[in-house]
Image (cartoon, rainbow, N blue to C red):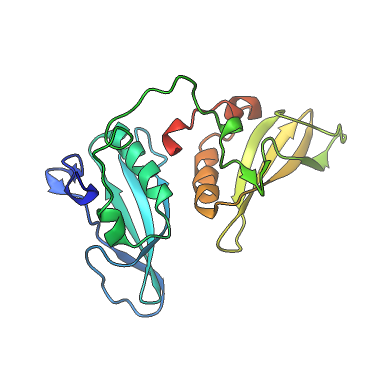
Amino acid sequence: MLLRNHPLLIYWNGRSWPPDWLWCGGFDNSHPRGEVGILKTVFVSVVKPSTSCFLVMEHAGAEYLSEFFVSDAAFCLEMYAVLLRHCGKTLQEIGDVDLSGPKAGHRTQRSTPMLLRDHPLMSHRGVPNWPPVWTWTDGLENTHAKGEVGILKAVTLSNIGPSYRCYLHIYYEGSVYIGCLLFDDHAFCGQLAKLLEGYCNRLIADIGGLELSYTL
């Protein structure tokens, strides 16, 4: 069963693949249609339950954005994981991905959940990046915060594209600290930043325990 033909790739009785493309920057808008261009990044909607992903692709020197709708929220997350693994591929190649196996289209049980703090993509040059090193920026006193401490107040993604780092701002014992997460995978970096934005005002320890098995 190829991705383009999968019966769950529907929304309101209409086929959701290939998605419609909206020009967002670069050379002239060539009004692309169908399986064209190269997938650059993908991120899942932060509105829960998530039934859409956003795809960014490059075609003829321009960037285009699309919202890819899926009626089933669980399958949407699995499709996100599939698309994330195929960033850098052409949309036609992605349409040819075989979803017949148990890892695509059917949720599998993991004996051990994959937590954010243990995720293999939470690393830079082979070194785990979680929790980040905290640097005091303001507040009562520098208590040299270490580990999964404090409350997440804000998340900012580096504006140097493609982004391989994001910054976490935390509040801890009356002071503000900043930590930098460095990644090897810029697509995962962008997705994680979007995810963390939805967890502001949560404990860093709780965020480290987020279950991310669907991204594998």
The quadrant of the image that shows the C terminus is top left
- Name the residue rendered at 31%, 52% in the picture: 67
From the viewer's perspective, is residue 51 above or below residue 113?
below
**Residue 201 seen:** no
Query: Looking at the image, which residue sits at the far top?
Result: 111
* Left or right of residue 183: residue 9: left
The answer to whether 17 is drawn above or below residue 202 in the figure is below
Residue 131 appears in the figure: yes
Determine whether, in the image, residue 5 is placed left or right of residue 102.
left
Q: Name, please, the residue furthest toward the bottom.
A: 28
Question: At 64% across and 35% down in the image, what residue appears?
Answer: 152
Residue ID at (38%, 38%)? 47
Quarter of image, res 181: top right
Residue 43, image x, y percentages: 42, 48
Q: Nearer the viewer, residue 61 or 140?
A: 61
- Between residues 113 and 189, which one lies in front from this camera angle? 113
Question: In the current view of this chain or complex, which residue is farthest to the left?
Answer: 13
- In the shown orientation, is residue 164 left or right of residue 64? right
Q: Nearer the viewer, residue 185 or 141?
A: 185
Q: Which quadrant is home to the N terminus?
A: top left
Question: Residue 98 appears at what percent x and percent y?
Answer: 26, 46
Q: Position of residue 60 (x, y in %)?
A: 36, 76
Residue 138 lies left or right of residue 186; in this view the side is right
User: Where residue 204 appears, x then y in whole percent?
Assistant: 64, 30
Q: Count of labels shown?
A: 0
Q: Residue at x 15, y 43 (%)?
A: 12
